Amino acid sequence: MLNEAELDALMDKHGLDAPARAQVRGIRAADPSRLVVSGPQNVSCRYPSKKMGKVIQAESHTCELAAIVLWEHDERIYEFYDQCPPIGLKGKDKTGRNRGYNMTPDFFVIGEDYIGWVECKAQTWLESKAKKSTVYEKSQEIWRCVPGQEYAERYGLGFKVMVDAEINQIFFRNLNFLSDFFDTSCPSVEPEIATRIIDAFGGKAYVPLADLLKIGDSELTSGVYKLIADEKLYANLNSELLVDVQFVNIYRDRRTAESFQLARSELATARDGELIQSISIEAGRGFQWNGQPWNIVNVGGDKVAIKDEAGTIQTLSRGQILLLVKSGDVQGNLSEAFSPEYEIGKMIAEASNKDLQEADGRLKELERIRAGEKPRVCERTLRNWKAKMRASNELLGSTYVGLISKYQECGNRTRRISQAVQDIIQHVIQEFLLGESPKSKQSCYAIVCTLCDREGLIVPSRKTFGEEIKRTTSQHAQVSARYGAKAAYALSEIVHWKLDNAVPPHGDRAFEIAHIDHTQMDVQLIHSVYGTPMGKPWLTILMDAYTRMVLAYVISYEKPSYRSCMLVIRECIRRHNRVPANIVCDKGNEFFSQYWETLLASLHVTKKTRPTAKGRFGSVIERFFGKANVEVLHQLKGNNTPLQTPRVMSGSHDPRKKAVWTLDELTAEFNDYLENTYSRLTHPALGVSPKVAEETSLRNSGVRNVRILNWSPILALLCLPEVKGGDRRIVANRGIKLNRTYYFHPMLNVPSLANTRASVRYDPFDYGLIYAKVGKEWLPCSCPEAAQLKGRTEKEVRLLTYELRETQNSPAAERQNYILRGQQLLSDHKKEKILIQQKHDMEKKVADRRMGVIEMRPEDIGKVAIVFDTAFEIDEDDVETYGEFK
């Protein structure tokens, strides 16, 4: 990036005034105005730029990402900023009305020759947009944004449109391939290796790259690419792909290459001259030039006069005509002189097997008659066959094609139903079959019958209506209207076209593009000690797209999160000491975590986000999940296949009861499958096994020392996730509590740290260790359980950690604990009620005794006579009588 003095000098060179300088400085100081997202068809990217020292966003990996990579390695481009602040544009629409709107340009570029905005667009998008808008237009074969240019000219800045079709895809792929060797941290080639490479030329001007790669190991291969990057060897990066090692030549220097290419161009010119002689350019021939009809009116020695429909006459040389034919601008009969061989081949190709068999039979019949045998057909038929043979012989020089029947051209092929009925059918299809509330085909046919009857038209048959639907409407459109785009995706067209020489979907080499995703494994596990059910584990995979090798995997009980992603990156570094240059992921929340993106940016990895619900963008890893299920998991005891149809499953076959595999054993089995089976199987898309593909690619692409990662404490901390919330409280004399366990370090005993909070990161592979940031230092804190893990292998520590965490954090186990505690509490509560009632009864008995109340026991009832005291006898005369209450 430029400092202030360099920036001022550059703006002085471009003659920018004060408002323009303020505009430039405002863009440099501003953050991106929005976050790019992947839509239905685009793959958004986050590119870690070393030139800019930050992550640059790209909304498309075909045009915008290519532009970023080109600028990253262009010495004349100093700075580039993505998603600049919006600018207000004004212009007129197709109807001539004034319009105003805001635009967020893709980039703002500061370079030696250009300062201004850049908008990156696809050629197809621009062509579609230009039909209904005046924002973009094509002038002199260059796409322009007129309102954008008018806005930029007010400040003396530029505004240009970069089109994907204009990017040299061969150069872009070569630049991408050599990017690691262009890096300033890439070491120079050792003199001994450089000497070996130069000696391999043996005095020749050039050597095929494949021959250079055969003389040594991958370190020498890296030396070849480094010498090319440093321009000590020369390769034509604009027209030859380095990945095509069998066809690309490496030259001693640029001058030798230019001389050799000049000789080749002269030879090509001579061949083109011969080609001109073979093209039939005759007076009277017609052709199409840029969609307009032209006719040849005169042919001279080297000049050809042509005339359009308006009568305008123009003269072209034969060389110009040849270039127009080769570029495809001229179409028609000019370059297609009449060829009998072509016509004969076309007639035979269009004939059915039955027609050819019939022609063979006719030819044999004629040969039989010539031999003197009696004809088996009438004389008129024989005359007809012979006449057709003579006609085809005069026209094409072949008698056989005259015997081929043309029954397929017979018959009346005009439509039987009227145009009015066709219009009604199309209206019903668009309005009712594909409309907002789609009806069934039977209901739509009923509507067609009603509308035709109302108009007095002949009602078409049900078969005709069905054929009209098939002829005009795709299955994709019908499913999309009824169930939505997600259901119709499986029926959508697979895009086979792409830009010429564009980067393949799976890259050019190993470790260029990798896919990451999660799935729940279809097998039930048990605890390694107690044998209790542990449920289904989760699998996180990082797969190389080019070789289909599994670079790293993690099996755990934890649901997918950013922690799983960081763990698989850590595992990839442990296995290979490197990470892929690009990682493709979906739109899961874990892939938008700040920790995940920070880790990728620190490792200089470009993150690509594929569209939602578009499985084909991640088909490589999705197919592996299905393959692993069928070949491994579904063959294990306790696999989850019966639970996929629970209504027909017997209780005795419940996989949760039949589970026998532990996490340790399953991990070992899965690793054995990857190492000894999957990696050695011939992959149908590769033609070789993933292991062979990886070895070949690494040998041909070099070591790439700049990508080698040595494990360090800083790198380890980057790969460790933070605890939920980010920090924890330091408890005096106890340490830091995490998952019901205290972790301690002697430095936490400092009195001033009591009740303060510290950032905490934990190791998902090691239960006995966490890291706490105190001041500027990360302290490793251990817990009492660490003693159980001491002396064990890394694999044992990891598996014990998974089981400890799953046991402590298991919702099912915690729920069962609450149930048992609740049962105990209910039992105690019932006993307390009984005790309280007994206590109340005892108190009542004591009070009754004091009052002289005789305690009656159940067994004494009927044995004791009841004695009444006569002194308390009531006389009837003493009772006062009252009248009726009214």
Image: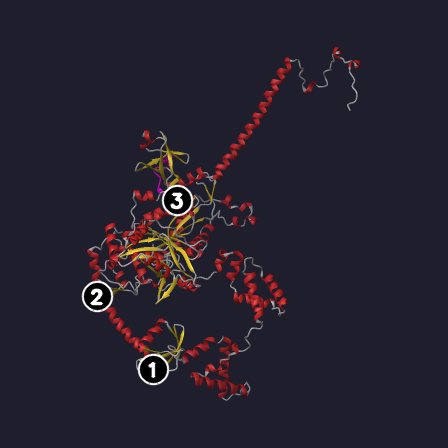
Mark 1 neighbour density, 10 Å: few (under 14) some (14–19) many (20 or more): some
Horizontal placement of 657 versus 699: left or right? right
Q: Amino acid at mark 3?
A: Arg
Front residue (pair 213, 414): 414
Residue extending farthest to the bottom is: 372
Mark 3 element type? helix
Mark 1 lies on residue = 299
Image: 166 above or below 832: below
Residue 135 picture location, percent across and down: 39, 61
Residue 650 picture location, percent across and down: 56, 47
Q: What are the residue bounds of the magenta stretch? A: 784-796
Q: Residue at x 23, y 51 (%)?
A: 5
Instruction: Classify residue 827 by image quadrant.
Output: top right
Mark 2 lies on residue = 255
Mark 2 element type? helix
As measured in the structure, the alpha-carbon distance from the residue carrying label 2 to the one carrying label 3 is 54 Å
Question: Is residue 795 found inside the magenta-colored segment of the image?
Answer: yes
